[in-house]
Amino acid sequence: MVPGNFFSILSSGNREIYYDALMILHEMFRYELNIRVDDYIASLIAILENRAFELEDDDETQEGGLTLSAKARLILDRLVKAGWVDKEFLDSSFIEIITPRNYAIPVMRLLSELGDDTLQEYNSLVFATYSGLKQAKGENKSHLYEALLSAKSNTEHLQYSLRTLYHAIRGFLRGIAPQQEVNTLLEEHFLEYKKMSDRIYHPIKTMDSVHRYMVPIQSLLADLMADNQLMRIMRERAINIRNYGEEEAEEEIQSDIDFIMDFYQAVGGLVSEIDRKHSNFTRSSIEKIQYLMTADHTIKGKLAEMLSLYSSGSEDEKSAIAGIMERHITADRQEFFDAKSLYHRNARNRRIDRDALVISPNDDLSLVAKDFLLERIASAYTIARIKEYLDSLFAEGADAVYPDSIGIADESEFIMLILALIRQGEDGLPYQIEIQQGQTYRDGYLIPNMIIRERQESSITIIDE
């Protein structure tokens, strides 16, 4: 039960001092098991010098005036009254210690994180999920349940990180429009945003690639659901650890697997949206910087901008702009026209009818242009082109392609084979590639021993034996 005046210290006139006091308490809690009152009072005195402190209505002043030590003890008493800490004596001694309340500890941690503007390094959450499930399934089946719990925790953290990254990019994007200083835009683009991109966005796209591991993770979970023996092992482990009934254990395991499967089924769209926002921010930032650097800041340019605003504004806006111009712009009557006047007479040119120029055909040039165009079109490795290449590997009636039947005519097909391995399972590419031990040479290229199969959509029904 949280006391009703728990957050009162953060809305009082001394809230900055109370915040610093909570941060000191949180720091001591991290490194000391028992926090002594004398040590905490000494730390408070160190931050109270030359700082104004307002007495609360129920504060009791001590004899000798409001000294630094008296202020520190008033702060500690306020934390006790608000329900943040308790004071008690250390076991079998007269040493007074401070004990933070259990509900106050996470709040202090939250306040500490809010005050910390350093970026957290991104952890390899996708790879950790994949490696944990694969190792437990292959080498330590008795701990599959723990691996599943860890996979769910990593997935929740990944979902939180991706959505936080998405909204962080939107925040940077919103900050571009009102900014009028080139140096500030450059600082945000090349320092603040690049720092976030290097620590969060770049790892997600490279070393912990979601697209690389999402299909293997879904395959591992599908294998677990299809294997009654593994499901039984996980149920028994859940019953022993959580004291579940068999039905409750089955329901929790199925719920965790469904959550992970659903997330990795939809995570591709979330990553694509993040990519789109990332590209949008980069483009908008560069365009705004270019605009500010090339905009006409002379009197003529500012006058042209005001006239443009006047022509596109509403009646109220036109009236306001007209009033500004009347107060600050002096206009003189134009009495005569000369070479320096605002008006320039159009120069008329006499049009003469002539025969059209004849373009002589050039077959060599046409062939070069055609080859160049075809080469540019062929350089785009689309999903459709990769699928067409994989389809060509399957013999008629065959359900799989083995290493000795993979043909690689040129570098383009070698690149498409690499992309097929990376992008397997995506929409429009219904293939599953199994990597085996060893490598083999095919048409001058060294490739791993792989078996390519068409991915079959199947529904799995678990029978309760």
Image (cartoon, rainbow, N blue to C red):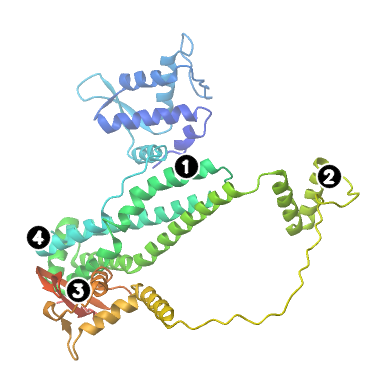
Q: CA distance from mark 2 to mark 3?
A: 75 Å
Taking the spot 18% from the left edge, 79% from the top edge, the residue there is 407
Check disc 4 and report the residue beneath it.
140
Q: CA distance from mark 3 to mark 4?
A: 25 Å
Position of residue 429 relative to residue 200, above or below, is below
Q: CA distance from mark 1 to mark 3?
A: 45 Å
User: In terms of secondary structure, where does tag 2 sit?
Assistant: helix
Q: Amino acid at mark 3?
A: Ile
Which label lies toward us, 4 or 2?
Answer: 2
Q: Amino acid at mark 2?
A: Glu
Dot 2 alpha-carbon crowd within 10 angstroms: few under 14, some 14 to 19, many 20 or more: few
- Label 1 near label 2: C-beta < 8 Å? no
Check disc 1 and report the residue beneath it.
187
Position of residue 288 relative to residue 82, above or below, is below
Q: Is residue 256 visible?
A: no
Q: Earlier in the sequence, mark 2 or mark 1?
A: 1
Check disc 3 and report the residue beneath it.
433
- Label 2 near label 4: C-beta < 8 Å? no
| Quadrant of the rendered image containing residue 228 | bottom left
Q: From the image, which quarter does the N terminus lie in?
A: top left
The numbered disc on residue 444 is none
Q: CA distance from mark 2 to mark 1?
A: 39 Å
Taking the spot 11% from the left edge, 72% from the top edge, the residue there is 441
Position of residue 37 relative to residue 214, above or below, is above
The numbered disc on residue 326 is 2
Dot 3 alpha-carbon crowd within 10 angstroms: few under 14, some 14 to 19, many 20 or more: some
Position of residue 358 relative to residue 24, above or below, is below
Residue 345 % position (x, y): 81, 60
Residue 7 % position (x, y): 46, 37
Q: CA distance from mark 4 to mark 2?
A: 83 Å
Taking the spot 44% from the left edge, 27% from the top edge, the residue there is 78
